[in-house]
Image (tube, rainbow, N blue to C red):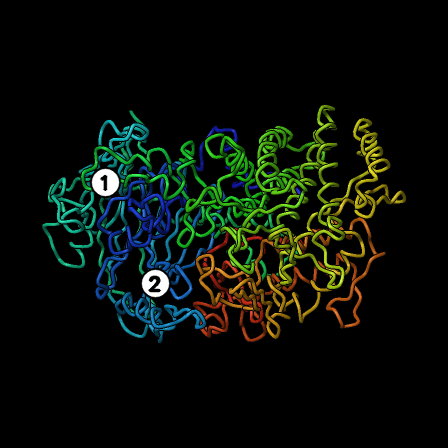
């Protein structure tokens, strides 16, 4: 479905931003939720990010590569940052950032332990709204660590709500909102509501600071003049803090009440390492001034590079109190600031909220019910709030920073720890993050999925984001796309081309689409496709061995490491991904060939390569990776000249279904060179017997189906897909068949024994880190691809092919109806039942019955295969925002 014609104020802002007449996106929610313990900030000798920079150091140590904060905003390079800090009078530390367990501390890996929600957002960030639930009692930092340490892999995570800290409503709902009057004129409203039965004190500290760019002495980011914040006396009326930066110019932060506290964004080296500080005022001064009452920790001259407006409020039960601020650029030579910067404050907020409603009323189908709209709005909000300034110059990171005596020097051989062959990678961009606390770094295949819902609300951002990863400062010279910062050389599934193709079609009607975008992406994707063919086809026989391919622990052993006995895998999913890649590139080439006949040759290349892959997966050695007895595709372990099928029924064997495309013969007839080559190939290549069953014409419809699976094999695999005792759960498709609950798969090799069972929730093994599990839960990205694939099969077969859904029920459905049933189950994860329970919340009573919780939705990384409870990262609105796309499809106009 194409994006609507711009008709709202927000659409107009997007147009202005695209034309660069007004840069509305210069400011946005670009701060990370967690900068500490990232690879970028790791200067250890062993590469252990969690121990080299723990949460305990975050308040005292200046970051090298970015900033974090509580619901923060910044300019597009995070040079000037604003966020909220809080103190309830009981906590041992100032609440400046979200707390969570490190990977070693959590019984299921890293895990944020906070209650926060993204409520609303527009793509130009003209309106942003988020909610933080802040307990009255001391935050249970130590208790959370200790209790989780007692739990093993078979026990659930111990969450903040489990501590009872929210009982009787003893917390503040703290809502922060931003509204723009111009690209660099932002009004800020912080509203605290006491939900408890007694009066409670709350310290609010809206904080403004400069990212430290002056201390490192590096050639790529050198600040000639150190920026400065200071208190200004501009006469009667509101108070102002000026913020002057050599690149940004002069900003003023206006506030109505509170005590300004100033310090420097410099490391407290004395506290951390017992070495002298560069000056008397350091990063943790605000914490010391407020929590420890150390008045001399802040600068009495009221100047520095970090400051906060300290406001203490007493809030009666059920009462709300509001703090108002305004941050705006003061253009050089402009008139003095207005006497009352808050004169239009409430009207501006109301206007931006109304405009946000108008924007989403155009985006979302009119027939979408209120509950579904609530989910969709929060899904889009989380997607937008997950943008982050991502800064990582690998060359500088490896070499270290010569002017920084307080920062540990990188160890010799640092590039051998990780990313040593990626010295070209230079990231200084706004990127879409999977989850800004648990995954505050890009993952290439995550980004591809993020851009599908993003294209509905901000087509330009979606296209630019996809092209960015194909640029020479990201893509390796050999053609590989970087996977994620822990190891750019790991291999994510090749879904980038699919995302480019989908976004291209979504963002314009035929004849009006952005061919320049498509062609630019296609040229670079050719390099990436060649890398896959050269590096991941071990025997040169079109059976691919991609490694873990994003599915973490789904295999019998860690597929990203050398296998036992120096064997290697011929992977059903790796081969399927490459078939899928071929078909996408074929579709793109055919589209480009409509205007440029040169692309006919490229179309022929991908058509023939797809047939070769199809033949390999279906016929090599007799039946390729297909098991005729089981009616399923399996990985095959090649060891000492013998091939052993690894008979785990998992998504690995379902992925061949996604490699399916329907070609229009009318389009092909306009390309005589391609048409002749295709006809010759199908008639004369008798050495490729698989070419016939998987390249099927329908002359009545004028269509031709290309698929990795023949019609009969597709139907046999589909039976597993739609069987509730196998893959089909009430909440979508499981990643491993439930049949393995009663009968785990066991592989014996020498003295070793490897087992894969059905594990519907958190993983029970540390394989591949242990912080995610692909052995049973429901994962949105693969579900989404399978839903789409079934729709493409239906487009060709129509009502001619029907399947039993659920299997054994006697109910016959077309493939499109079956895909809609899977989609319904997936979106049902987030919708309340008659009792108010949303499966994603796992039966938590507050979310079902408490009026201050029941409308809130979390978009987890993955979901329990039986109950639907959200698991893994709790704010992974990146690829889980695909649910919004599925909801929209259910209520499409017409």
Q: Residue at x 69, y 62 (%)?
A: 721
Q: Horizontal placement of 93 versus 388: left or right?
A: left
- In depth, the one of 661 and 503 nearer the eye is 661
- In depth, the one of 205 and 786 nearer the eye is 786
Task: Write down the quadrant of residue 7 in the picture.
Answer: top right
- In depth, the one of 183 and 812 nearer the eye is 812
Residue 425 x/y as whole percent:
43, 34
- In depth, the one of 623 and 716 nearer the eye is 623
| 192 relative to 398, above or below | below
Q: Which residue is mark 1?
A: 241
Q: Which residue is mark 2?
A: 105
Regarding mark 1 in the picture, which secondary structure is present there? strand
Q: Residue at x 26, y 51 (%)?
A: 58
Between discs 2 and 1, the one toward the N terminus:
2
- Report if residue 887 is visible in the image: no
Residue 14 x/y as whole percent:
52, 37
Q: Horizontal placement of 297 versus 880: left or right?
A: left
Residue 747 x/y as whole percent:
58, 64
The mark lying in front, picked from 2 and 1, is: 2
Regarding mark 2 in the picture, which secondary structure is present there? loop
Kindly check if marks 2 and 1 are in contact, taking CB atoms under 8 A apart as contact: no
């Amino acid at each position: 479905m194409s994006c609507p014609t711009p008709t709202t104020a927000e659409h107009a802002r997007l147009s202005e931003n695209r034309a660069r007449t007004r840069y509305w996106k210069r400011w946005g929610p670009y701060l990370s939720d967690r900068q500490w313990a990232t690879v970028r900030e790791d200067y250890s000798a062993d590469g252990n990010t969690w121990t080299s920079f723990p949460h305990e150091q975050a308040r005292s140590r200046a970051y090298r590569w970015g900033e974090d904060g509580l619901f923060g905003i910044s300019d597009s390079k995070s040079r000037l940052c604003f966020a909220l800090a809080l103190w309830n009078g009981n906590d041992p530390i100032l609440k400046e950032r979200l707390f969570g367990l490190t990977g070693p501390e959590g019984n299921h890996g890293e895990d944020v332990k906070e209650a926060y929600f993204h409520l609303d957002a527009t793509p130009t960030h003209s309106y942003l709204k988020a909610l933080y639930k802040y307990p009255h009692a001391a935050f249970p930092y130590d208790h959370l660590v200790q209790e989780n340490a007692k739990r093993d892999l078979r026990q659930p995570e111990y969450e903040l709500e489990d501590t009872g800290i929210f009982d009787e409503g003893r917390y503040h709902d703290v809502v922060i909102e931003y509204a723009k009057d111009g690209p660099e004129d932002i009004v800020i409203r912080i509203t605290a509501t006491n939900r408890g039965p007694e009066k409670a004190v709350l310290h609010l500290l809206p904080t403004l600071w400069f990212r430290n760019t002056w201390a490192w002495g590096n050639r790529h980011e050198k600040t000639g003049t150190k920026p400065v914040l200071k208190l200004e006396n501009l006469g009667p009326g509101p108070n102002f803090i000026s913020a002057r930066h050599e690149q940004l110019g002069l900003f003023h932060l206006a506030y109505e009440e509170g005590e300004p506290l100033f310090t420097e964004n410099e490391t407290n080296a004395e506290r951390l390492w017992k070495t002298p500080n560069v000056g008397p005022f350091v990063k943790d001064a605000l914490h010391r001034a407020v929590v420890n009452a150390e008045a001399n920790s802040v600068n009495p001259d009221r100047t520095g590079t970090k400051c906060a407006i300290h406001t203490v409020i007493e809030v009666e039960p059920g009462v709300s109190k509001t703090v108002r601020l305004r941050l705006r650029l003061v253009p050089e030579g402009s008139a003095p600031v207005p006497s009352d910067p808050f004169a239009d404050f409430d009207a501006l907020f109301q206007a931006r909220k109304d405009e946000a409603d108008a924007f989403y009323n155009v985006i979302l189908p009119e027939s979408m019910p209120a509950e579904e709209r609530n989910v969709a709005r929060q899904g889009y909000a989380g997607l937008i709030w997950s943008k982050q300034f991502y800064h990582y110059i690998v060359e500088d990171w490896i070499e270290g920073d010569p002017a920084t005596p307080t920062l540990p020097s990188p160890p010799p051989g640092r590039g051998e720890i990780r990313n040593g062959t990626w010295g070209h990678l230079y990231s200084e961009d706004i990127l879409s993050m999977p989850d800004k606390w648990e995954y505050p770094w890009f993952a290439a295949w995550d980004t591809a999925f993020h851009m599908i819902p993003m294209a509905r609300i901000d087509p330009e951002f979606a296209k630019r984001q996809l092209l960015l990863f194909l640029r020479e400062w990201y893509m390796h010279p050999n053609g590989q796309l970087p996977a994620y910062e822990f190891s750019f050389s790991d291999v994510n599934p090749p879904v980038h081309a699919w995302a480019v193709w989908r976004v291209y079609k979504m963002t314009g009607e035929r004849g009006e689409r952005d061919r320049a975008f498509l062609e630019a992406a296609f040229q670079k994707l050719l390099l990436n496709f060649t890398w896959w063919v050269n590096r991941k086809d071990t025997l040169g026989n079109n059976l691919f061995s991609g490694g873990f391919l994003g599915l973490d622990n789904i295999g019998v052993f860690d597929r990203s490491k050398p296998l036992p006995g120096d064997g290697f895998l011929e992977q059903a999913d790796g081969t399927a991904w490459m078939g899928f890649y071929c078909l996408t590139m074929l579709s793109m080439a055919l589209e480009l060939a409509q205007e440029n006949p040169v692309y006919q040759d490229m179309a022929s290349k991908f058509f023939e390569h797809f047939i070769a892959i199809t033949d390999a997966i279906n016929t090599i050695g007799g039946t390729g990776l297909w098991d005729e007895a089981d009616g399923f595709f399996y990985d095959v372990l090649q060891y000492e000249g013998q091939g052993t099928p690894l008979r785990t029924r998992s998504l690995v064997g379902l992925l061949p279904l996604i490699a399916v495309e329907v070609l229009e013969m009318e389009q092909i007839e306009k390309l005589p060179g391609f048409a002749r080559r295709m006809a010759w190939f199908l008639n004369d290549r008798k050495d490729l017997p698989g070419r016939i069953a998987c390249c099927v014409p329908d002359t009545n419809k004028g269509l031709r189906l290309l698929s990795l699976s023949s019609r009969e094999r597709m139907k046999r695999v589909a039976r597993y897909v739609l069987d509730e005792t196998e893959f089909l759960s009430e909440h979508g498709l499981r990643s491993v068949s439930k049949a393995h609950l009663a009968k785990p798969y066991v592989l014996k090799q020498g003295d070793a024994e490897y087992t894969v069972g059905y594990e519907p929730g958190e993983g029970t093994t540390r394989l591949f880190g242990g912080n995610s599990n692909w052995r049973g839960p429901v994962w949105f990205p693969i579900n989404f691809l399978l839903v789409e694939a079934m729709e493409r099969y239906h487009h060709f077969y129509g009502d001619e092919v029907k399947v039993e859904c659920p299997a054994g029920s006697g109910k016959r459905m077309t493939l499109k109806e079956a895909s809609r049933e899977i989609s319904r189950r997936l979106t049902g994860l987030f919708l309340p039942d008659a009792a108010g329970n949303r499966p994603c919340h796992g039966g938590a009573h507050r979310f079902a019955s408490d009026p201050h919780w029941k409308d809130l939705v979390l978009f987890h990384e993955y979901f329990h295969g039986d109950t639907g409870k959200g698991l893994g990262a709790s704010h992974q609105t990146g690829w889980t925002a695909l649910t919004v796309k599925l909801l929209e499809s259910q209520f499409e106009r017409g």
